[in-house]
Amino acid sequence: MIGASMICRSGKRIGAVALIAFAATGLGTAQSPAVPSLIVMAQPAVAYGPYNAHILQGGIELSKKLHEHEPIASAQHSWSMSLWFKSDEPAQTAFIAGVGHPWEAFPRYLALKDGRPAFWAGGTGEGHELIGATPLARGVWHSLAVSVDADGKSHLLADGAEVAAGTIALGVSSSTIVMSPTKGSLWPDTKHFGGLLAQVSLRSMPLSSDAVSAMSKVPAGLDNLPFEEGSRPWPVQSQGPSGMVAPQDPSLLPHSAAPFLAPKALPPVVGTDTATNDGNALILRHGWMLADAEDIKVSGSEIAGSSFNDAKWMPAVVPGTVLTTLIARGVYPDPDFGLDNMAIPESLSKHSFWYRNTFTPPATMKGKKLAMTFHGVNYRATIFINGNRVGDVLGAFRHKEFDVTQFVKPGEKNNLAVFIEPPFHPGIAHEQSLGAGSGDNGGVMMLDGPTFGATEGWDWIPGIRDRNIGIWQDVALTASGAIEVAVPQIITHLTDSNPAITNAEITVHVPLVNDTKSAVRGTVEIAFDDVQVSKAVIVPSGGTSVELSPKDFPQLVVQHPKLWWPNGYGAQDLHTMKLAFRQGGKASDIREERFGIREITYEISAFGSNGHVRRVEDSPTVATLLGKGPVIEQSHEGFRETPEGWITSIVPGMEDSPALEPDADTKLGTALVIKVNGVRIAVKGGSWGMDDMLKRVSRERIEPFFRLHKEANVNMIRNWMGQDTEDVFYELADEYGMLIRNDFWDSTQNWNLEPDDSELFLANAKDTISRYRNHPSIAVWCGRNEGVPPPAINVGLDKLITELDGTRYYSADSNKINLHDSGPYKYQEPEEYFTKLSLGFAVEVGLASPPTLEAFQAFLPKEDQWPISDDWAYHDWHQGGNGATEPFVQTINDEFGPATSLADFDRKAQMLNYEGHRAVFEGFNAHLWQPNSGRLLWMTQPAWPSTQWQIYSHDYDTHGSFYGVKKASEPIHVQMNLPAHDVAIINNTLVPLTNVTVTARVFDTMSKPLLAKTITLSAAANAETPALAMELQAALEAAGTVLVKLELKDSAGELLSDNFYWLAANKSDYRRMNKMPAATLTATAKISTATGSERHATITLVNSGTGAAVATKLTLKDAATGLRILPAYYSDNYVSLLPGATKTIDIAYPTISAATTMKVDLRGWNVTPASIALVP
């Protein structure tokens, strides 16, 4: 050891060096093969290293910074670089390690060329590279070095022998060591190196003869060095802010020029709960009472007693939150309006409450097993019945069932008391204002997940004062015999490829609950459509699960099944399965379960065991039916980075599973592709942060939102952070063809705190998966918003989904693994959605989206409507941060001039709304499958009256954003691709288009024709087809601003799609549109007869003038009050008509009193406001 000293890992030299390695079993001495030994090798002075690395062939490089202006990086002589490597690949051409980057003029790299050792210094040919003659074998260790002597001659060494030498032109490299670089080679067919690198070292002197000789023998222990991963596993969370720790500075609170509205009490809903026809179920929705626990001084047993008097309590809204009741009873004003949420005390978040109900079950329930199920209670609930404590519920998403047979008396009055407590850490809400901005997203309450974490306040929702505690979903009493049928698992597997799907195999797992102490003999029966199956079983004490599958029951192979399809791809056929358990021919329990016949598979990129990236199609259903478990890894260790982003890995040993099919399409990069029934789905849609901030989620209230999504031609809703997890959400998604990307209740890694109780989290997840697994709409389970859940939760979710579902992909992360990163969230130039934003499968992209003039006027007090005020900021008009509205306002100013009033702002903002939201999805269309496979807005659904991140208003009104999305997402579509202005056909249907004609006409702002082109062609199914090269530059330069009309017609001349654009050479040129002449429109309006609960109005617009009419807006109103009629569904809106053009628009709306007179108001960019009376 004399003359040797330690290696400094920082890169500094400390005298001579002792290189230390460990040898383990198989690499040690013959005397001690199993005992690690220290190997000490004398080496020249080392400037940097030794570095040890494990590189995945499909992964990323590993780099180390040198000192700034490091002399070795520019040395022309007297330096060396050496390493050991073990390659995974045969005869490859790859750069192993070097100084600088391969794209630089003068890098210095040890490499392989067709498996032969090489040294490369930039450029090609003699004077730039040294190449040995003999390839080096894969799978074994080799040494590789370059030593540049005092005369500047370079010596290439492999396995301790010189294999080439010569004078190489060396320039200045950047001060970086890069191991296995991923980009920038001049050599043809260069691949990324995959394998192990050991003792990568850079020296400020040439190698000595002893050092060269030492490199001829593989040192013991190389395989057991501490290798640094080039593609590291996904990290665990290292930090998490807890939100506000003190109340907001009063000077930064929002202020209004108007007083709070007075609370308005509504009459309680009067009614009586009645049992189902068979007398076996009673849903408790009437007769509930509510009181603040601070006012109650007796126990739960007393409250649930028959002598307790609740006459002074207030009638409660159930299902509903505590705050919903307090608003309905006139305690507080509606927080949707203005700053009225500020009138509700934040201290409510720390209050507990009592609910009480007196109910009478039917006498027919006597002698049966009785169960009471709480479908959703937030956050902590303690239940008492008839003076007895029954049990507890913890977490907002439990589906908790209690055996209440011994407590409930059928045919008599029973008393139920429920004690509701808030989350342990309700936090402090931030109040948005112009001065304070949007604040943090969430806070300390994230510790309490599973709950409504957003209610502490987010940048799209204020702090909800009660944090949505209460009995927010139904409470049901059910009766059964000894054996209860629980929620089945219905697995549908298609045995044929689309489009010739002729058979579907149905496998059903029927869970049977037996709480008795004895086994019970009986028969399990299922029936759906014309299929009937029965099986004799013995149910042991504790219960069992019975499998009914096609291998035992051929009738479970359904011929020519009616399939469930996402919106735009086919019908949403649904089937109802009746399940029963019978004893001696008598039904012990019967339940019904609705399901859809469909199968979802997933194209993804994943690492194989050899470190290569494989493109595969994963069928979780096949894996489950084979009993083999998941084939795709969903662990921190399995997630690794590639040059194109993070991807997952194939489970070791499962690479040849029948559940994996190879996918040869490389145009998609690493992006996830969702396939339904064998068809790639071009996923378009958006997130729901929350359906309603107070969880007012009746079918009547929520269904219009789903219908609007269907009419906007989108097909996916993301249940962000699981805040919409309720029965009606999934039922409506099934009916309207919305695929659901379903998050659980954990948010942004290293920003939000992680759930404190993993067992609680997983218990809620277990109920959610079991309860909703048969909904065909659910396409993906997602562990966490913007991150991977902590390992205990992530592993637990993966296990639960495998065991309880097994037919869907579990995506641990929402925005990186096989997905595109989140954002941006503010206004962008439209062309950027075509060129660089949200490529692949993007789960969040958002932009400002102010609602209509009428919507603004409905939720803001008149005093605060204009100019922009704290009321705007409170309703999400952000002055900074992710959702800064400054780019939106600046674009209005640049293109059209500053707004002078709310009406003027609306007129100009809707132009940007339409154009921007159309560009989001037309940009997606332009690169469909190359690499785009999905694009979701942040968001489509507002949780309350908002000013951005929405395509319609909370009151169902639809503004320009909605119609931009609707236009771009239509199944057959003609569009102009930016920035080149080429025209393309988008055919999202499953049928090719033949002999269709595309016409493009260009006009100046005075409607003078400038250019016209036409072409007849065919367009493939489910693809983008280029049609016309427009070459608009000359017209733009001549006119400054142009109007472009596109039309797509079939071979019979019927219009399939049209589109209208306003384009300018420069932003300031858009101001030419301010000088457009007022359009001359004539209109007629007729009312159809009522059909069920809906009527239709038909509006025909004719442009009878000489100038174009741009962005014409129709609004259906009550003629007497001037109020909008909502919801209303317009076949089109914000329409633009050239001179002589006609447009017919259908408006569907709820049937209202025949005495109500209606009108349609018209306005537009250059359309003089007018009203049209509706006539029968």
Image (spheres, rainbow, N blue to C red):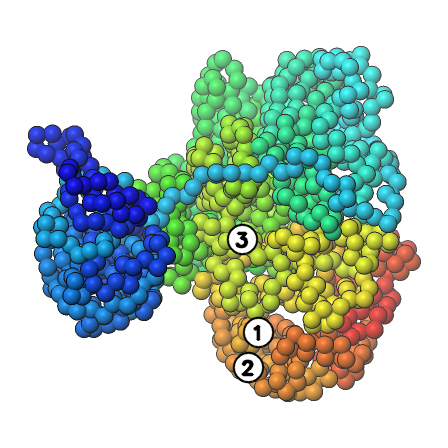
Residue 976 has which mark? 1
Q: Quadrant of residue 1094?
A: bottom right
Of residues 200 and 60, the one drawn nearer to the viewer in this rendering: 200
In the image, is 809 to the left or to the right of 1084? left
Q: Quadrant of residue 391?
A: top right
Residue displayed at 82% across by 76% down:
1082
Residue 822 has which mark? 3
Q: Of all residues shown, which one is farthest toward the left?
A: 30
Q: CA distance from mark 3 to mark 2?
A: 33 Å
* Circles 2 and 1: CB atoms closer than 8 Å: yes
Residue displayed at 61% across by 34% down:
444
Classed neighbour count for the residue bearing mark 1: other residues with Cα under 10 Å, few (<14), some (14–19), many (≥20): many
Query: How far across and down, in percent of the image, does residue 749 sit?
Result: 51, 42
Against 157, is 772 above or below? above
Residue displayed at 68% across by 78% down:
1069
Q: CA distance from mark 2 to mark 1?
A: 9 Å
Counting residues from the start of the chain, the first of labels 3 and 1 encountered is 3
Query: How far across and down, in percent of the image, does residue 594 sit?
Result: 57, 40
Of residues 941 and 904, the one drawn nearer to the viewer in this rendering: 904
> Secondary structure under badge 2?
loop
Residue displayed at 59% across by 45% down:
719
In the image, is 282 to the left or to the right of 970? right
The quarter of the image holding the C terminus is bottom right
